[in-house]
Image: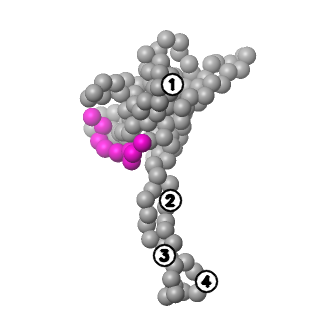
Amino acid sequence: MATLVQGFLKLHLGTGETPTYAAIPGVTNLNGGGFSPNKIDATDFDTTPGTREYINGPREPSAYSFEMHYQQGDTQQEALFTAEATNTPLPFRVVLGAGAGAKQISFNAVPNLTLGAQVDGKVMYSGTLEPVAAPVRATAA
């Protein structure tokens, strides 16, 4: 059975040495995660003609992308702008669900934000979060 995203998924930003997390307001979509495929060619003279052989290699964590409507003066959003300006990684987590079955994906990243605004619309920012190490999926705290 499908799950409605609204109210189920949140993008959180952490603050402090032992992070305390709070939802980033105004987020309207979130995409990404996982890892890029990486394989190393191990083809040799024993490989079946016309084919290749591969071994597993290191993989890069894939970026997350999101959009949010700008809320002037919001603490979490302002922290994103500050981290972008100073090239400082921040702790993030994606929370899926609530209660005993809830999961979270935690990672650190430097936000990259791009402004988008139309005369008859909202002020929006598109964001990219490229994890600096492999994200960790776990039971939500």
Numbered badge on residue 85: 1
Numbered badge on residue 50: 4
Q: Mark 2 or mark 3: name the one nearer the start of the chain.
A: 2
Q: Nearer the viewer, residue 17 or 35?
A: 17
Numbered badge on residue 30: none
Q: CA distance from mark 4 to mark 2?
A: 22 Å
Q: Check residue 104 for magenta coloring.
A: no
Residue 12 appearing in the image: no
Q: CA distance from mark 1 to mark 2?
A: 31 Å
Q: CA distance from mark 3 to mark 4?
A: 14 Å
Please state if 126 lies on the left or on the right of 34 as rendered.
Answer: right
Q: CA distance from mark 4 to mark 1?
A: 51 Å
Picture residue at 31% right of the left edge, 44% below the top: 138
Q: Quadrant of residue 24?
A: top left
Q: Check residue 140 for magenta coloring.
A: yes
- Which segment is the magenta one? 132-141
- For badge 2, the amino acid type reads Pro
- For badge 1, the amino acid type reads Ala
Residue 7, horizontal then vertical, whole percent: 44, 29
Picture residue at 49% right of the left edge, 66% below the top: 39
Please state if 105 lies on the left or on the right of 18 as rendered.
Answer: right
- For badge 4, the amino acid type reads Gly
Label total for image: 4
User: Which residue bears the numbered disc 3?
Assistant: 42
Numbered badge on residue 37: 2
Badge 3 crowding class, 10 Å Cα cut-off, few under 14, some 14 to 19, many 20 or more, is few
Please state if 50 lies on the left or on the right of 25 as rendered.
Answer: right
- For badge 3, the amino acid type reads Ala
Helix, strand or loop at label 3? It is loop
Q: Mark 1 or mark 3: name the one nearer the start of the chain.
A: 3
Picture residue at 39% right of the left edge, 47% below the top: 134
